Amino acid sequence: NAGVTQTPKFRVLKTGQSMTLLCAQDMNHEYMYWYRQDPGMGLRLIHYSVGEGTTAKGEVPDGYNVSRLKKQNFLLGLESAAPSQTSVYFCASSYAGTPYSYEQYFGPGTRLTVT
Amino acid sequence: KNQVEQSPQSLIILEGKNCTLQCNYTVSPFSNLRWYKQDTGRGPVSLTIMTFSENTKSNRRYTATLDADTKQSSLHITASQLSDSASYICVVSPPGGSQGNLIFGKGTKLSVKP
């Protein structure tokens, strides 16, 4: 049981390049999330999904797109990377249901640098 | 604006000592309040989750308390170990249990020295 995995772990992009971050979970969770974490700031939600084929915007969605074609995978895309997108990106997943089942399980993170 | 404020920003303690981290929030009412531990270079890991009606929740040497009247929560770490060195994040979930709008504090960075 690997939990939540993220690919890649590190990446350096030049401004204007594109890339896709992959998140996979093997816990059969309905909900999945993408966050970014910047120094001195709390985690901020980029996009989330409450089920296969659905996505919704979070707090900071601009410059990102997502897709949830399969229940176990959640992809985060950067179409034209900007230095402001330099950050550590975390994927998380959770069950739906009662308040206690809202616990979110996080992946190990992807450290992205845009030069 | 709903906010979650944590204090102190950072803390250094000696191994074996106890410590208490604070979380003040303005979200009211709320669905639940969580504490996460984040080791350097890793993703956050859940320590406790409390609903608005709970006062305390323990997980091994970690005890979280909640005072809904003063809108404060604390995380008490007993007999600290070197492995407790990490950032501790307080998270509040607004009513309705919506997963799209958790409010994260900036965290308290704890360093446990031998």
Image: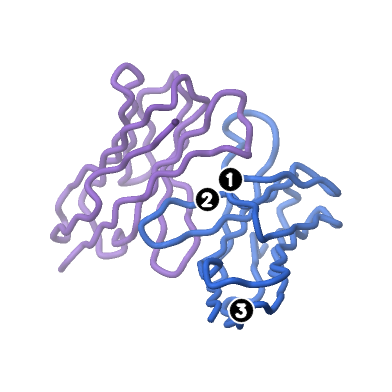
Chain colours: A blue, B purple
Numbered mark located on residue A15 in the image: 3
Numbered mark located on residue A59 in the image: 1
Indicate the amino acid at tag 3: Thr
Which residue is pictured at 22% across the width and 42% down the height?
A: B20
Numbered mark located on residue A101 in the image: none
Q: Are marks 3 and 1 in contact (CB under 8 Å)?
A: no
Q: Nearer the viewer, residue A111 or A73?
A: A111
Are the residues flagged by discs 3 and 1 from a single subunit?
yes
Above or below, A108 relative to A47: below
Measured from the top left, where is residue B78 in percent x and y? Answer: 23, 46
Label 3 is found on which chain of the structure?
A: A
Above or below, B15 relative to A114: above
Label 1 is found on which chain of the structure?
A: A
Measured from the top left, where is residue A45 in percent x and y? Answer: 58, 49
Q: Are marks 2 and 1 in contact (CB under 8 Å)?
A: yes
Which residue is pictured at 74% across the width and 62% down the height?
A: A75
Which quarter of the figure has residue B54? top left
Find the distance from the CA under tag 3 to the CA under tag 2.
22 Å
Indicate the amino acid at tag 1: Glu
Check disc 3: other Cα within 10 Å, few if <14, some if 14-19, many if 20+. some
Kindly state the secondary structure of the residue where label 2 is placed: strand
Kindly state the secondary structure of the residue where label 3 is placed: loop
Find the distance from the CA under tag 2 to the CA under tag 1.
6 Å
Measured from the top left, where is residue A52 in percent x and y? Answer: 84, 48
